[in-house]
Image: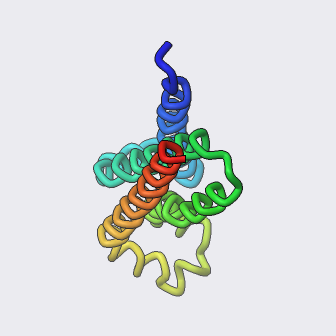
Amino acid sequence: MIPGLAPLLRAAFGGVVATMGILTIYFGLLTLVSDWGFTRAEFARSWPFIVVLATGFGIQVGLYLCLRSAVRAPRTQAMVAVNGASSSSAMLSCVLCCNASFVNLAPALAATGFFTAIGRYQTELFWLAIAANCAGIVFIAVRLRAALAAMRCG
């Protein structure tokens, strides 16, 4: 086996599992609060955003796992923990995209117009979440590159 290939394969596998996991959560939440027909219709309407966000989340997880295996120092792990904010935004966007379903669960919030207002800006929120996802990927990639460079020099 090629030296160093096992951590890369683990990171790639972890990224794929994370992508599938967040999609499972998305489909599970929508189906739980509504029905399968609504879930399919909502995904058909928003699939480009959902797939991009889920893939970006998987890339972040894969990069994180690669960085974690490259450097085991507590300082590095603390730096990478900051990435949780952009990963959370990806999950938040998945939840927000099905805001019509949550109106059924939260009539008090629906009465205030909260979900109606979010629904108007759903596309913009998707783009914001994609930007945060990209920022998270760049953040981890820069840290991984620095860690690998330090390992080569040290």
Q: Nearer the viewer, residue 144 or 118?
A: 144
Q: Write the residue at 48% across / 42% down.
A: 152
Q: Write the residue at 50% across / 12% down.
A: 1
Residue 82: horizontal and vertical position, in percent? 58, 65
Residue 75: horizontal and vertical position, in percent? 66, 60
Q: Write the residue at 67% across / 46% down.
A: 72
Q: Nearer the viewer, residue 1 or 49?
A: 1
Q: Write the residue at 37% across / 51% down.
A: 50
Question: From this viewpoint, is residue 31 visible?
Answer: no
Residue 3: horizontal and vertical position, in percent? 51, 21
Q: Is residue 107 left or right of residue 44?
A: right
Question: From this viewpoint, is residue 45 visible?
Answer: yes
Residue 15: horizontal and vertical position, in percent? 49, 38
Look at the picture and state if 93 lies above or below 16. Answer: below
Q: Hey, which residue is sitting farthest right in the picture?
A: 74
Q: Is residue 85 left or right of residue 97?
A: right
Look at the picture and state if 81 lies above or below 57. Answer: below
Q: Nearer the viewer, residue 83 or 127?
A: 83
Q: Hey, which residue is sitting farthest bottom in the picture?
A: 112
